[in-house]
Amino acid sequence: MPVSREVVESPLRQGADEQIIYTLTTTPWGSTPTSPSMVVKDLSDGDTDVTDDVTTGSISTDGDVLTLKTIKSLTAGHEYRVEVKFTAGSSVWEPFFIIQAEM
């Protein structure tokens, strides 16, 4: 049976004024991830790419754990989809999680 692309903890809740650095363990999809990247889309605003507006920093790897960019400056009441792409072995994976922004 294939592994779900959606992260088990999804959806997550984050306050509009919070700045959170999430981690993602890639083991369900593959080990020793390389070439990580991420995109944040505002689902409440027509699936708009807001990555440059709501993230800062860079992604780092430590074994099978990706430490993502800081997610910040969300709009309360909006729902966001965070897509994390990486290569493991000869496969390219793109799991995702949902963030519901709150006051």
Image: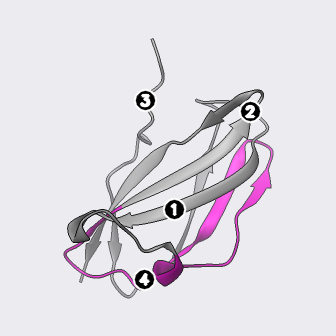
Which structural element holds mark 2?
loop
Query: Where's the N terminus, which quadrant?
Result: top left
Circle 2/circle 3 CB separation < 8 Å: no
Q: Which residue is mark 2?
A: 31
Identified at 74% across, 32% down, the residue is 31
Label of residue 4 in the image: 3
Q: CA distance from mark 1 to mark 3?
A: 19 Å
Q: Earlier in the sequence, mark 1 or mark 4?
A: 4
Mark 3 or 4: in front is 3
Q: Quadrant of residue 21?
A: bottom right
Indicate the amino acid at tag 1.
Answer: Val
Q: Is residue 99 above or below residue 29?
A: below
Indicate the amino acid at tag 4.
Answer: Glu
Which structural element holds mark 3?
loop
Which region of the structure is painted magenta? 52-80
Q: Earlier in the sequence, mark 3 or mark 4?
A: 3
**30 relative to 11 in the view: left or right:** right
Q: CA distance from mark 3 to mark 4?
A: 28 Å
Identified at 64% across, 57% down, the residue is 37
